[in-house]
Image: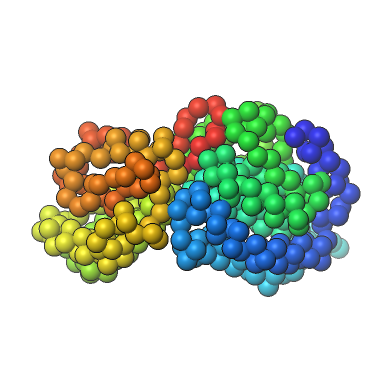
Amino acid sequence: MQNILNKQREFFKSGKTLSVKVRLEFLKKLKEVIKANEQEIFDAIYKDLGKSSTEAYMCEVGLSLDEITYFQKNLKKFAKDKTVFTPITNFHARSYIKSVPWGNVLIISPWNYPFLLSIEPLIDAIAAGNTVILKPSAYSPYTSEIVRKIVKEVFPEEYVAVVTGGREENKALLEMKFDYIFFTGSSNVGKEVLRKAAENLTPVSLELGGKSPCIVDKTANLKLAAKRIVFGKFVNCGQTCVAPDYIYCDKSIKDEFVGYIRQEISRQLGENPLENKNYGKIINEKHFNRLCGLINQDKVVIGGKTSSETLKIEPTIMDNVTWEDAVMKEEIIESSTDEGLEIAY
């Protein structure tokens, strides 16, 4: 890994990544290779998370392609020097803002959107003129492999390289000196990434999870609110960092609102979601067991059934939940806090 980073440093110093034309050529090639491998990507995401091809395109592949298109349309404009006001004391000069890349970038991506959250920050980093070492999650091995295959087909190793593996690889990468780190995951692991980055004064972008509430007051369009909350919560089986986590609801409309929630779950996911082939699964047995442990069956008003064979959990709603309940003491989609950083939210 250190050898790869050394090669990337030399490649960046050569100035070959600075050409906007070169960046656009590689983005074009990346788009072509993604399209050519679309079915393989769908198959990999299905093996890792049980997502249908429709959901995989909507939430992962399609968004990645849109990101490339956005930069194909706007990169030349973004890369241009921007003239700004020149102080009178420097009237002989011209003042401008110049956009320059950071240099060598490390991207650590999670397992819950393993293609999107690997490829999209990669697109951004390449568009900005950086080199990249990409570390996908060990918990989504099939998608990590197709990402590695695509990157290898598009980029030389001194430009972009994929490092697979788990605990040891993550620890080693964070010991190395990068010019920028982009991490997607939980707040707890984000703190560790930030701590390691601070040792080298490396700037960081952290895209983290949390407890995300929805507030439904008595003036709300309850049917529409239920439709949006059910979709936002149960897409990817709730394995989304910004998915609705809990609801503050006005008492006067609570029962009616729960009824709409029940209707929407049935409409969107069927009467028996555990048998719906388009309803995905929890990433692994460890997370499945942890999530099952957060469900208090005495407070369940919708769902609550699970299948240990398929690692599926019904869309589940609990009522009369307090901050003393286990489900409110941690993120529902949580990560490991170990040094290995091998689990994302």
Q: Is residue 60 left or right of residue 276?
A: right
Q: Is residue 256 above or below residue 180?
A: below
Looking at the picture, tell me which residue is in the foreground, 193 or 266: 266
The furthest residue to the left: 252
Q: Look at 20% across and 52% down and name the residue there.
A: 302
Point out residue 5 in the picture as x, y percentages from the top left corner. 78, 38
Point out the residue furthest to the front here: 309
Compared with 322, 147 (above or below) is: below
Up the image or down, 208 lies above or below 227; here it is above
Image: 192 above or below 90: above
Q: What residue is shown at x 50% (from left), y 27% (from top)?
A: 338
User: Which of the two residues, 104 or 166, is positioned nearer the viewer here?
Assistant: 166
Quadrant, the N terminus: top right
- Position in image of residue 257 (x %, y %): 18, 61
| Residue 79 visible somewhere in the drawing | no
Residue at the (34%, 41%) spot, across then down: 308
Image position, residue 125 (x, y; %): 69, 53
